[in-house]
């Protein structure tokens, strides 16, 4: 009897304590412990494939409807179905498709989030970074690192579409977003085409430069060069069990990732191959570039065609399959440099 | 007329596009651009002070009500008023007050989030880390780094309270939380008291050790030693305009922060002093240790007493004031190593 | 009187002590203190210019007289006049001119000393490094880093001459010379021409490679590329007061010197220019490449023509003068990475 | 016949070439190739043991004969028998015994060579480094890093003797010796006793300091502390096959060697033990501290007593033997940081 009374009293006291906590902005760890400290990562974000066949008409409709003077904002964001309310494809990464019409300009600005671009369609547009223009052709990889002035323009007669990848969700979480508009619509062109490649991308550097080293000084990595190396690797090297043949876009001032928060890769899945599944504590966003294939994520098949985008969340098993006769080529970017810098990287089959 | 019709049509088309996007898990950047890319960090988290006079009775009530066999979960979490729904004091940091009663044990486990402790009340409890026990006295700073086995116990006759600081919100965002229970209730004690201090904290190291270097191998930093250094600095050194006299808990294997994601400090605000405000893109959690003072955050005064906890979000101006006759001593921990590792650190007055 | 006796006694005792020391392999510091600890570096090595017009006939005479099967040793060493008895151009560096006749092979071997080559005359010879051949054209810069297999051959119809630069004197001083002959006369060719350039010299790297990072993975740096960058710098950049326009051969895996012990540069002294003298605690070996000019070393003029070699010892003032109408182009290599790694680098005007 | 004539002609031509080379400061590599590129390190320096019983009387005789105002030069240098003409115990290292009499002062100066001291006899002398005095007791390890002001004095009533270790031969080879006298006989004392230990040697550092990181900020490493750690290791840890129990003097700002060019160790050879021979491309200078033992170097036994000094050249096999009942304790310093920084380190049994 007494113990029942005690138990009831105890229960009431607990309820009273619980109800008192929020007013003091306190919470009970014992209430959320199990869901907070899980034996393995439990992600809200989920795997997903955005089909180019769905996105393309919507993107061109956006091009028609969003005015020219908002070209720098004319982007369809790819929103992870598990992260409702966030402009994010993973908790750290953002991805979007941007379209620039002939004659348009995406106004010059800079921001602390880092950005990468992978050109999908059209040619002859340019990105200008710190006074250097680079022409964008399909498959080209272009970076606009943290806090450098950049703008885009399209002086060709075709629409140009590219994939944008940013660390915006992470930098937002870190309460570190800064943004500035350039005083003019476009920054002046002060360096010849290909200048940064000549200065840093051929095995040399100006000896007295004062280049920042935390991001690559190379503005553009042409697809032509990347594909030549991939082809060489496919012909001469052994196949990696998880990634086939894969190259990393390099920061030649450190030997590491191209940006302090994002790593980027181009890979070749050989014809008629089924690679081995693995998983790691970094998230990846893939873009189909050539051929077609399948990424199986925790056993679910995501069949991709060129220009499709697929997200593989952290710690989800994934494997690549290429059933066809042609190599399947995928671009990807990840948040691996963040995970490694904080000593949280794990990988397993 | 015609243009009105066109405008109406355009508006309808835009609405149609908007309503089509969510079904494809797409979003319109032009809709969220301004709020996403702000000229300066705009934080949801806000400054706040948790008063020990409020927290203490609730904590002892929790001690009474949360059973002994859940001692490792008996923590009052300090929840930032701006981050509703999250177990977080900032977007990257967690803080809580833990109480262990005489005879209790907080069971042994390990997890990828890093943790620090600062002892607030009581003495004679212990933390065991990787087979080494350390006795916890008021003001002592103890670390339990990523993925090392740790447990706590209280073999004294007093309740013991400490501040817990973890990077749990960050590691959760990075989808990298792993957790394991130790097979036994407590890990065996395999090293004498003070072993890691003797091995790494006096200017030597075993030459053939294989210590991980990404976190400090020192388990405990006694308050006695820290205060002795602070006193020395107060008597011999110039006053730093923003921080008075401040020491960093050191990782002697790198010369840097004590943990890969968190930096910790002890500081001395001289009597009768008003320091200069500054701000930086890292968040700080302060704990009053001795004396009393004020932190003015964006002009609002937060008057602290010993054991009060104050959070200063990223990029909020803050300055220290000590109106009294005695030095005011504050402990703090921050996410600065994360911000610096990702090249996002900024500081200004 | 007494003091005279004492003084004599004292003198005798001192002599006795002096004469006793050598037998115990002891020496008196007070005897050599002043010469050991000088206010500034006092070098035994001296500046010197080796004239191509003198060396060329001797080199071709050596080619005639040293048998084909000793081609790998058919090198005229440039011996610093101040370092008699040493095979050294500075206390850390070695330089030599090597000549390989049509059809000859310099046998495959490896050694711990690092080597660089700068092609002076002839074309069509090759260097093979770790299974990769590279064709050597005038001005090309080729490395054979520490402990990699290398051999040379000349399948053209012309004699080929290059400058060899090694850290052999340093590695000898460090008692760390290892040397091995390859089991065969030449190593098998296992990689296509230009393989390392494709893999590492264009802004990419194979993501799963396991390249050593302490030396550049790039085997050959073509003169064509280096000169293109220099020309760009000469047209677009400001003139460095000491070095005109100067590029560094880069290790793209670190952003630093091409070899752990040697840094290499190509520089452009503009027409009609007199640069500013400076000095630094690293030694430089210069090779004239194009045009002609003067290096004034501690005020003494050394007028150089293409293929002349000039040594500037550590801490000697030197300045570049180009009185002519054409740019003067110099290659150089230095021991600066050693000096910097040991925190001994100083520079002043 | 003809061929005899040809051969004679050829021989004469070779002789003529040979005799022409020196005048142009050229040499024939083919003449010295085999001795320059040896399959393994061939050292001129040899192993040797300097016996305290021989050195002590000579040292006290020097104390009597070298005047007080030359106290900073009153050092018996230990000269490697294989390096005649050099003030060197190995090609990179210098060792000497210094004696300071009661009331004497070794005048204040600084130099680019780094120095270590290990106190052998007497107590109560001091070393002052950058305004901080440290009292020297037997076994204490004191550093005077590159280019810091330092002086010594003896205010006790006993003579004090210590071992000096410098990188002077290396810094001389690198033509980087700078030296300055302090304007006064002694620098002013500006910091309390033990200041650097309090600031850096207990797990903290002043957060806003601007300490150089290439050498340890700790001035003195007391023997008492080092021995306590060694004793702990001897009781708790497994025995290293080559070194018994061995600690490294640590630079807490890097986790590495105490000086950029020299590493220092204290080791404990357990009673009745014969360790395993090994060799490495760094040279070591040992000093007997407690007990006695044998170092077998390439099979030759060097039996040491306290205060004996033994040199083990690079790449000579050596093993430790302790036949006695007591632990044998050895101090040593090496040039290993140099060898490692230049990627030349090798080790084998």
Image (tube, coloured by chain):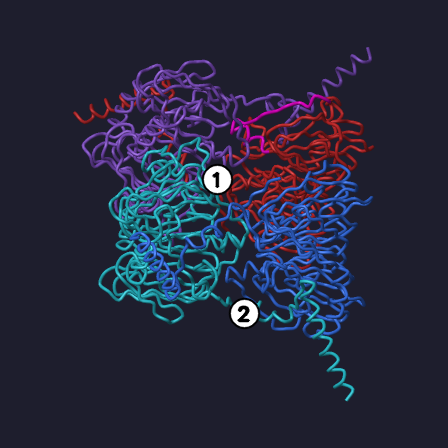
Chain colours: A cyan, B blue, C purple, D red
- The disc placed on residue A255 is none
Question: Which segment did they paint magenta?
Answer: D167-184
Q: Secondary structure at mark 2?
A: loop
The N terminus of chain D sits in image quarter: top left
In front here: C46 or B200? B200
Work out which residue is located at the far left of the displayed protein and give it: D2
Residue C14 visible in the picture: yes
Residue drawn 40% across the image and 70% down it? A298
Q: Is residue B4 magenta?
A: no
| Residue with the mark numbered 2 | A39
| Image spot of residue A82 (x, y percent) | 45, 66
Residue drawn 34% across the image and 67% down it? A302
- The disc placed on residue D342 is 1
| Image spot of residue C196 (x, y percent) | 32, 44
| Image spot of residue D186 (x, y percent) | 74, 26
In this rendering, position of residue C238 left or right of residue D262: left
In front here: B59 or B298? B298
Work out which residue is located at the far top of the displayed protein and give it: C1
Work out which residue is located at the far front of the displayed protein and give it: B1
Q: Secondary structure at mark 1?
A: loop
In front here: A162 or D306? A162
C-alpha distance separating marks 2 and 1: 44 Å
Asked if C12 appears above or below C282 in the picture, the reply is: above
In this rendering, position of residue A97 left or right of residue B285: left
């Amino acid at each position: 009897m007494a113990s029942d009374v005690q138990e009831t009293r105890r229960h009431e006291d607990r309820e009273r304590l619980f109800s008192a906590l929020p007013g003091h902005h306190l919470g009970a760890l014992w209430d959320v412990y199990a869901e907070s400290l899980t034996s393995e990562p439990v992600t809200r974000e989920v795997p997903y494939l955005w089909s180019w066949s769905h996105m393309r008409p919507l993107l061109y409709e956006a091009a028609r409807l969003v005015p020219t003077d908002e070209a720098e904002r004319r982007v369809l964001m790819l929103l992870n179905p598990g992260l409702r309310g966030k402009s994010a494809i993973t908790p750290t990464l953002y991805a979007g498709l941007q379209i620039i019409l002939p004659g348009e300009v995406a106004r010059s600005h800079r921001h602390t989030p880092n950005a990468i671009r992978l050109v999908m369609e059209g040619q002859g547009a340019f990105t200008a970074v710190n006074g250097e223009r680079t022409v964008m052709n399909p498959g080209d990889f272009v970076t606009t690192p943290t806090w450098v002035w950049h703008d885009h323009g399209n002086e060709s007669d075709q629409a140009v579409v590219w994939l944008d990848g940013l660390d915006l969700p992470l930098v937002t979480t870190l309460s570190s977003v800064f943004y500035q508009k350039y005083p003019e619509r476009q920054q002046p062109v002060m360096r010849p085409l290909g200048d940064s490649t000549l200065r840093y991308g051929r095995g040399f550097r100006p000896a007295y430069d004062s280049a920042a080293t935390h991001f690559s000084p190379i503005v553009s990595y042409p697809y032509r060069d990347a594909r030549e190396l991939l082809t060489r690797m496919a012909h001469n090297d052994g196949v990696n069990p998880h990634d086939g043949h894969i190259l990393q876009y390099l920061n030649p001032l450190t030997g590491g990732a191209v940006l302090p928060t994002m790593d980027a890769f181009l890979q070749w899945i050989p014809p008629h191959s089924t690679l081995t599944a693995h998983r790691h504590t970094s998230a990846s966003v893939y873009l189909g570039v050539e051929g077609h294939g399948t990424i199986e994520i925790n056993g679910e098949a995501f069949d991709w065609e060129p220009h499709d985008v697929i997200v593989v969340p952290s710690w989800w098993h994934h494997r690549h399959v290429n059933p066809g006769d042609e190599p399947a080529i995928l671009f990807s970017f990840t948040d691996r440099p963040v995970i490694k810098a904080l000593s949280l990287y794990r990988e397993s089959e």
